[in-house]
Amino acid sequence: MTDRLTEVFDLVGPLHRRAQRKVEQDAPIEGLSVGVRAVLNMLRDLGPMTVPQMGRAQALSRQFVQRMTNDAMARGLVETVPNPAHKRSSLIRLTGKGRAAIDAVIARERAVLRQVGADLTEAEVDACLRVLSRLLRLLDDVDVD
Amino acid sequence: MTDRLTEVFDLVGPLHRRAQRKVEQDAPIEGLSVGVRAVLNMLRDLGPMTVPQMGRAQALSRQFVQRMTNDAMARGLVETVPNPAHKRSSLIRLTGKGRAAIDAVIARERAVLRQVGADLTEAEVDACLRVLSRLLRLLDDVDVD
DNA sequence: GTGAGAATGACAACTAAGGTGTCATATCGC
DNA sequence: GCGATATGACACCTTAGTTGTCATTCTCAC
């Protein structure tokens, strides 16, 4: 069993690299770096959130997310909105332009993924999500900043 | 369904980063960089193989694997053995020292993974492996070198 | 065989993802 | 109000990983 989990990790590396490479190949169309793309993606899925929150969500350093966010802001892809819960740390939100950009990227990726759908059952993908989430939680303590 | 697959990719990023960080935390004990560790791990699981083969197996550039291999060789962790199939490109094999080093690392990691075992069924992990393998194959074309 | 083309290894830049360290300022809990 | 903590800005750094070039060696087709 533990062996099997080790295999999972052995797949995660190559998969992540290939995925990154794919993103890099496609995203230049919109001019998004991998980091900016990650920020937009988070905001798209989880709604407006603060920079430190994003860092924790993706296991990235606060400062890295900050830079990516500033970059996205300079490009007009995101904007700040006052944070009721914390006056200093404003919420970051997608602009219309940002949403359009990330939606375009996601749409292209979904088109690729659709080829795979047929070979896999919904149950398998769910199981996969459960396993990965569990592993992620196991490593929760290994965070930075 | 396609949505679910997107979620898988969204987990792969953070998981890979945390795993890398964990490896970095632990491996320094043996003095292994992430790259060298990957090479040793491959040789451990798949037996002796050539540098280009390793590159393809892990979706890494041939040259990067070459450097890591040279590094490992300089440390006495791997050695070359004549390749019957190809006289120029010799097989790379773990030395006793190399095997000891990677075994120690793996053992430590397995100890961590054992905590998770209880929460997951074998079937789920198998499904996860199937899904990840399928996705990996989908991106087979995205390789370098 | 032999010659063309591919595969390998060495070496040297180069890129970019991502982290670290520090500082000023602002926030929040007590 | 005060101390601890969180945030953001700025600058620097590390290193995983790629790209390019070149010489050599292999392979394979003829």
Image (cartoon, coloured by chain):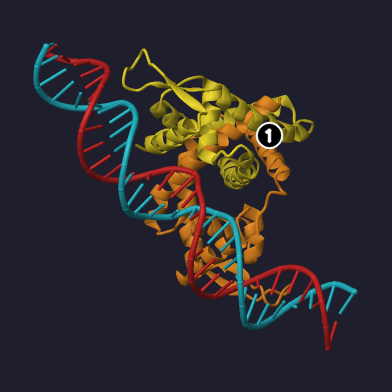
Chain colours: A orange, B yellow, C cyan, D red
From the top left corner, tell me how far across and down residue A62 is, in percent.
61, 62
Nearer-the-camera pick, A104 or B100 = B100
Query: Which quarter of the image is occupied by the N terminus of chain B?
Result: top right
- Please tell me how crowded label 1 is: few (under 14), some (14-19), or many (20+) other residues with Cα within 10 Å: some
Q: Element at badge 1?
A: helix
- What residue did someone put label 1 on? B109
Q: Is residue A20 left or right of residue C20?
A: left
From the top left corner, tell me how far across and down residue A76 is, in percent.
47, 70
The answer for which chain carries disc 1 is: B
From the top left corner, tell me how far across and down residue B48 is, in percent.
48, 20
Regarding residue A17, the answer to whether it shows in the image is: yes
Vertically, is B12 above or below B39?
below
Regarding residue A121, the answer to whether it shows in the image is: no
The residue sitting at 62% across, 65% down in the picture is: A51
Query: Which quarter of the image is occupied by the C terminus of chain B?
Result: top left
The residue sitting at 77% across, 35% down in the picture is: B115
The residue sitting at 41% across, 28% down in the picture is: B51
Nearer-the-camera pick, A75 or B108 = B108
- Please count the marks in the image: 1
Nearer-the-camera pick, B37 or B137 = B37
The residue sitting at 46% across, 29% down in the picture is: B57
Q: Is residue A115 left or right of residue B106?
A: left
Vertically, is A29 above or below B88?
below
Q: Amino acid at mark 1?
A: Glu
